Image: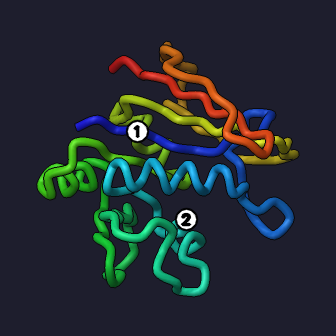
Amino acid sequence: MKTILWATLSANGNYAQSGPDNPPKKEALHDFATHAKAAGNFIVGRRTFEGMRGNGGPGPVGEVDIVIVSRNASDIPGVTVVRSPEEALNHLRQKGHHTALISGGADIHNSFLSQNLVDEVIFNVAPVMEGKGLNILIDKDNYLYKHVELLNCKPLGGGIVQLRYAIHR
């Protein structure tokens, strides 16, 4: 199964935190929806999913399989809750998916990366710099390097530049 990690980064390289003072750009949200629909699924952490759902609406992309990775979430109607990245991928494989889209947050991204479960990354670099932020890491304890291959670079609009890399594992 091909796994694609999708994330928005700030211009100074942090994992972009959205909130009232820094809402997500509509261009990035549209791009996410396009990728989720193409994959037919996305994998997300519980807190990020709750943020996406906002006030309990139908969700961000309509009819796709949503898998939440959480150690302490209980059943959530309309989604599958699993305890690990491997369990998330196995679930999507069993449902017949050939691609998995990993959509956030930082803990989920770092978990998949540290376990060498990512084939591609899509980074949307937003036109904002943060004073304090989270990092996307391949290993939080060691100074490891993983070389990647640039597959594509394109502007999305709104000052966002998208970088797509292959990770050789």
- How far from the left and from the top, in percent, is residue 61? 46, 65
User: Which residue corresponds to mark 1?
Assistant: 4
Image quadrant containing the N terminus: top left
Q: Classify residue 63 as left or right of residue 106.
A: left
**Amino acid type, mark 2:** Thr
Q: In this rendered view, identify the residue nearer to me: 70 or 53.
A: 53
Q: Kindly identify the residue that appears in the image at 34 percent across and 38 percent down.
A: 3
Q: Is residue 77 left or right of residue 60?
A: left
Query: Where is mark 2, residue-wise?
Result: 48
Residue 129 left/right relative to 145 = right
Q: Is residue 130 above or below residue 161?
A: below
Please provide percent x and percent y for residue 28.
Answer: 64, 50
Q: Closest to the observer: 15 or 7?
A: 7
Q: Amino acid at mark 1?
A: Ile
Q: Secondary structure at mark 2?
A: helix
The colouring scheme, among rainbow, by chain, secondary structure or one colour, is rainbow
Residue 97 image offset from top left, x and y in percent: 21, 49
